[in-house]
């Protein structure tokens, strides 16, 4: 008697050629900020103006304390047509420009002298940092006694406000130049002039532009205070007179003009920096 054996066959599915982690590639978010948006820096100020206008239209703001944007525009147009605003704007621009040029020159020259020589560093760096520790606007009474109440003391204070950040940032950039570049320049036999042009200037430019932006902003900040002290013209004088008569709209006109000057000058410095340092590959570029 023959025993019959039943055999059960189990079909096993074939494994894929590659059995590993999930083969679907997940797209990662880029780590960079992304593409630069056109006129992106105007978005914040425009948003503030929109919120200001909406709050004024809704009656949430007291017109006597914070006039509506259209009221400020009307006041600015009236001051411009009667010749008051153009004269004050030109006076303020002249003061700020003169003080800025003097401060820019002093900051660059002192930074180069201090950053490239040990003797210059010993004589200059400590003095500048001592000056930085003293509130610049606190020097106004002393400068009035020295230079009088005319234009000279105002320009001198603006120059001090400007030169300090330019010096500090340029000197820091010079001190941060990699010593290996200096060794390479010595090996290549570069003279002093070529060393400054090919090593020092490119290495110091990023810090210089940071100081330049701070100096531009500082010139406007110093100007708005100085023009309210023994002045007979300028935007600060216009705002001071408006304060005496309770003209909030005129004060806001002055503040808006100062803000426009600051934004335009900072944007100009940024554009120059982007063009001059176009060889750099940075996160913002």
Image: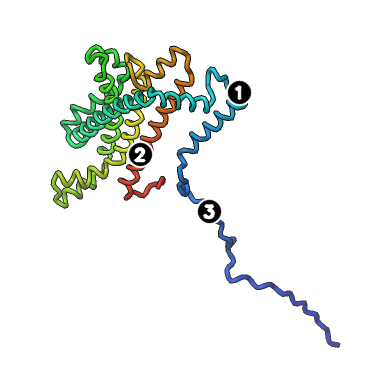
Question: Alpha carbon of mark 3 to alpha carbon of mark 2: how far?
Answer: 36 Å
**Left or right of residue 158, residue 77 in this image:** right
Residue for point 36% across, 40% down: 270
Question: Which residue in the structure is indicated by mark 1?
Answer: 60
Label 2 environment density (alpha carbons within 10 Å; few <14, some 14–19, many ≥20): few
Up/down of 96 relative to 115, above or below: above
Alpha carbon distance from label 1 to label 3: 45 Å
The residue under label 3 is 28
Determine whether the residue tagged by mark 1 lies in a helix, strand or loop. loop
Q: Which one is in front, 129 or 91? A: 91
**Residue 18 percent across, percent down from the top left:** 57, 68
Of discs 3 and 2, which sits in the foreground?
2
Residue 124, horizontal then vertical, whole percent: 20, 27
* Callout 3 secondary element: loop
Q: Is 120 left or right of 85, judged from the image as shown?
A: left
Q: Position of residue 113 (x, y in %)?
A: 18, 33
* Percent coordinates x, y for residue 200 in the rendering: 22, 43
Q: Earlier in the sequence, mark 3 or mark 2?
A: 3
Q: Is residue 173 left or right of residue 36?
A: left
Of 222 and 127, nearer the camera is: 222
Q: Residue at x 77, y 77 (%)?
A: 8
Mark-to-mark CA distance, 2 and 1:
36 Å
Camera-nearest residue between 59 and 126: 59
Q: Is residue 234 above or below residue 209?
A: above
Which quarter of the image is occupied by the N terminus?
A: bottom right
Residue under label 2: 268
Sequence order check: which comes first, mark 2 or mark 1?
A: 1
Q: Secondary structure at mark 2?
A: helix
Q: Which mark is residue 3?
A: none
């Amino acid at each position: 008697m023959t025993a019959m054996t039943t055999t059960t066959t189990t079909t096993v599915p074939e494994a894929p050629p590659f059995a590993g982690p999930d083969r679907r590639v997940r797209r990662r978010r880029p780590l960079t900020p992304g593409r630069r948006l056109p006129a992106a820096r105007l978005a914040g100020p425009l948003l503030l103006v929109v919120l200001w206008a909406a709050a004024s239209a809704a009656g949430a703001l007291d017109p006597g304390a914070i006039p509506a944007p259209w009221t400020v525009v009307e006041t600015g147009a009236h001051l411009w047509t009667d010749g008051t605003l153009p004269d004050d704007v030109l006076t303020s621009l002249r003061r700020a420009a003169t003080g800025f040029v003097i401060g820019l020159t002093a900051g660059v020259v002192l930074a180069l002298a201090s950053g490239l020589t040990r003797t210059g560093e010993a004589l200059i760096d400590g003095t500048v940092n001592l000056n930085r520790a003293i509130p610049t606007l606190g020097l106004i009474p002393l400068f009035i006694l020295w230079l009088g109440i005319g234009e000279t003391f105002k320009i001198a204070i603006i120059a001090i406000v400007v030169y300090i950040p330019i010096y500090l940032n340029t000197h820091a950039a010079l001190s941060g130049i990699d010593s290996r570049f200096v060794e390479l320049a010595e090996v290549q036999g570069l003279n002093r002039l070529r060393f400054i042009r090919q090593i020092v200037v490119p290495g110091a430019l990023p810090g210089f532009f940071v100081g330049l932006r701070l100096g531009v902003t500082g010139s406007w900040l110093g100007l708005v205070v100085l023009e309210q002290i023994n002045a007979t013209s300028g935007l600060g004088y216009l705002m001071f007179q408006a304060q005496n008569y309770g003209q909030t709209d005129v004060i806001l006109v002055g503040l808006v003009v100062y803000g426009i000057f600051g934004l335009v000058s900072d944007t100009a410095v940024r554009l120059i920096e982007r063009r001059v340092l176009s060889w750099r590959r940075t996160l913002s570029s």
